[in-house]
Amino acid sequence: MERPSLEFIDLRIEDRVAFAFLNRPEKLNALNEKLWFEIGELADWVSESKEVRALILSGHGGNFTAGIDLNFVMEMQKRYFTEPEGVRQESLRTYIGKLQASFNALRNCEKPTIAAIQGHCIGGGVDLITAFDLRYGTKGSTFSVKEVDLGIVADIGTLQRLPLFIGEAKTRELAFTARNFDGTEAHRLGLLNDCFETPEEMSEACKKMAKQIASKSPLTIRGIKKVLNYNEARNLKDGLDYVANWNAASLFSDDLKEAFNAYMEKRMPEFKD
């Protein structure tokens, strides 16, 4: 399979490990539409490639990702808002499914995947890292399940996968409040496999882990991933389908408009029921 041509991801191969970097540093690596789908392209290529046995994804510019680019959300609103309600819901349900599939490609990738997190990992960034097999971060990195502050139900995997790592009660707290938590807490909760003082220490640990995995039997590694993924697959699919249906009906609500207006006006949003 030919190596993909990627605009917003830097990619290099070393010792059978793919080192990939989200590359929109001027936007804190916020996820626009192109970058979002490039992540899925990358995962599909890694899964098929004979020259790669593990993937490490990190971000350029001192951050992992600030989450979904707000311009991307506004583009979606313009794209679908003028459609009749029934058509809009079906179009959105299909599109949300495609967004989910791009991150699911990481979970379904036949090679182990490692997220190396520093700086911001916000909103869609948490969706993204929960699709990885292993997650490492710095103590000073910042995490947030941010979607509630935008009047959105997280719909790309956080609400399905995060409870597997940190438990349901803590997931509810973080999703209800959108509060920030650092790498030390993320490690204590179980979201991170380990955390480090510096990005350099983290990168070295990720590289060491990836090379250790790359030295193992590829057939056995594939089997381990398939069995573990099978165990979680049914509940995951049902949960993703459910939230896609929910957001297809409610995504462009008055709450979303109020959240955006408040953000632009630098004030707290006032949500009505």
Image (cartoon, rainbow, N blue to C red):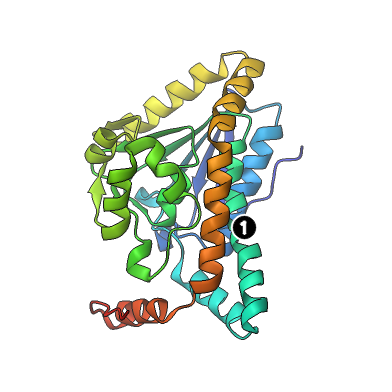
The quarter of the picture where the C terminus appears is bottom left
User: Residue 242 in the image: x percent, y percent?
Assistant: 54, 57
Q: Note whether residue 194 is visible.
A: yes
Query: Could you tell me which residue is drawn at 32 percent across and 47 percent down?
Result: 171
| Image: 159 above or below 176 | above
Residue 191 appears in view? no
Looking at the rendered structure, the secondary structure element under dot 1 is helix
Residue 26 vertical placement versus 102 (above, below): below
Q: Compared with residue 21, is residue 50 higher up or lower down, i.e. above or below?
A: above
> Measured from the top left, where is residue 94 in percent x and y?
66, 63
Q: Quadrant of residue 46?
A: top right
* Residue drawn at 35 percent across, 76 percent down: 259
Rendered view: 245 above or below 57: below
Q: Which residue is mark 1?
A: 97
Identify residue type, mark 1: Gly
Residue drawn at x 57%, y 38% as measured from the top left:
233
State left or right for residue 153 relative to residue 263.
right
Q: Is residue 72 left or right of residue 46?
A: left
Give whichever of 10, 136 is nearer the camera.
136
Determine crowd level at label 1: few under 14, some 14-19, many 20+ residues with C-alpha closer than 10 A.
Answer: some
Q: Quadrant of residue 230?
A: top right
Most foreground residue, 272 or 190: 272
The image shows residue 218 at horizontal and vertical percentages of 64, 18
Q: Position of residue 150 (x, y in %)?
A: 37, 70
**Number of marks in the rendered image:** 1
For this orientation, the residue located farthest to the right is 1
